Amino acid sequence: MTDLQFSVEPPLSGTEVEQIVGSLERLRATFRWKAGGLDAHGLDTRIGASTLTLGQLLKHLA
């Protein structure tokens, strides 16, 4: 992903809903950018002491 595609920023002004939706879109874009090249084994990886895998987190964010 290029910097242009990654530049999803929440609005600086707007309603509370627009701010929340913008923040969620940015978080989703960041996660998609970081996890985009992972295979099934990578998505099944657990991070630290958590029982949540990257694939489960991706499903949750969807």
Image: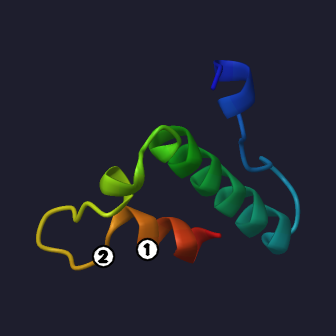
Which residue is found at the position 13% from the left and 64% from the top?
Answer: 48
Under mark 1, the amino acid is Gln
Q: Position of residue 37 (x, y in %)?
A: 48, 37
Q: Quadrant of residue 54?
A: bottom left
Q: Is 17 placed above or below 33 here?
A: below
Relative depth, front residue between 36 and 9: 36
Count neighbours of disc 1 (C-alpha within 10 A) and say few if under 14, some if 14 to 19, many if 20 or more. some
Q: Quadrant of residue 19?
A: bottom right
Q: Position of residue 62 (x, y in %)?
A: 65, 70
Q: Is 31 placed above or below 3 here?
A: below
Which residue is found at the position 77% from the left and 65% from the top?
Answer: 21
Is there a contact, CB below 8 Å, between mark 1 and mark 2? Answer: yes
Q: Position of residue 6 (x, y in %)?
A: 66, 32
Left or right: residue 11 compared with residue 45: right
Q: In the rendering, which numbered label is found on residue 52?
A: 2
Q: Quadrant of residue 20?
A: bottom right
Relative depth, front residue between 19 and 3: 3
Which residue is found at the position 54% from the left and 76% from the top?
Answer: 60
Helix, strand or loop for disc 2: loop
Q: Which residue is mark 1?
A: 56
Task: Measure how far apart labels 1 and 2 are at the Cα level.
Answer: 6 Å
Q: Position of residue 2 (x, y in %)?
A: 65, 20
Quadrant the N terminus occupies? top right
